[in-house]
Image: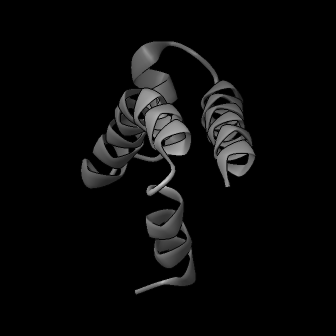
């Protein structure tokens, strides 16, 4: 088990932590699903951007911003 998983498991014993973690779970899973779907379809950010009619840099910034925000929220919990 990774250090993160061990740390998470210990913190999940705290009801306040567990509740906040569960509040963040749907957002994290939705974002992860979108990013994973792009990767599983073997699509680059550029290909996805072309299909959506937006720039690749926008996709990159969006993915980075989302992940950064989630990491920040998770770090508050840990």
What color scheme is it? Answer: one colour
Left or right of residue 76, residue 67 in this image: left
Instruction: Please say if 77 is above or below 20.
Output: below
Instruction: Decide which of 20, 56 is in the foreground and name it.
Output: 20
Instruction: Decide which of 22, 70 is in the foreground and name it.
Output: 22
Q: Quadrant of the C terminus?
A: bottom right
Residue 70, how many percent across, how many down?
62, 38
Q: In which quarter of the image is residue 28?
A: top left
Instruction: Count numbered badges in the picture.
Output: 0
Picture residue at 64% right of the left edge, 46% below the top: 74
Instruction: Please say if 44 is above or below 49.
Output: below
Residue 34, how many percent across, how many down?
36, 34
Residue 64, how many percent across, how many down?
68, 40
Q: Quadrant of residue 76?
A: top right
Picture residue at 67% right of the left edge, 25% below the top: 58
Residue 52, how many percent across, how many down?
44, 16
Q: Quadrant of the N terminus?
A: bottom left
Picture residue at 50% right of the left edge, 64% below the top: 8
Instruction: Decide which of 54, 76 is in the foreground and name it.
Output: 76
């Amino acid at each position: 088990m990774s250090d993160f998983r061990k740390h998470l498991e210990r913190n999940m014993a705290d009801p306040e932590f567990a509740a906040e973690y569960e509040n963040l779970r749907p957002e994290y899973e939705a974002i992860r699903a979108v990013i994973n779907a792009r990767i599983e379809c073997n699509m680059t950010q550029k290909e996805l951007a072309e299909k959506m009619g937006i720039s690749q840099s926008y996709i990159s910034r969006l993915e980075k911003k989302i992940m950064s925000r989630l990491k920040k929220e998770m770090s508050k919990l840990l």
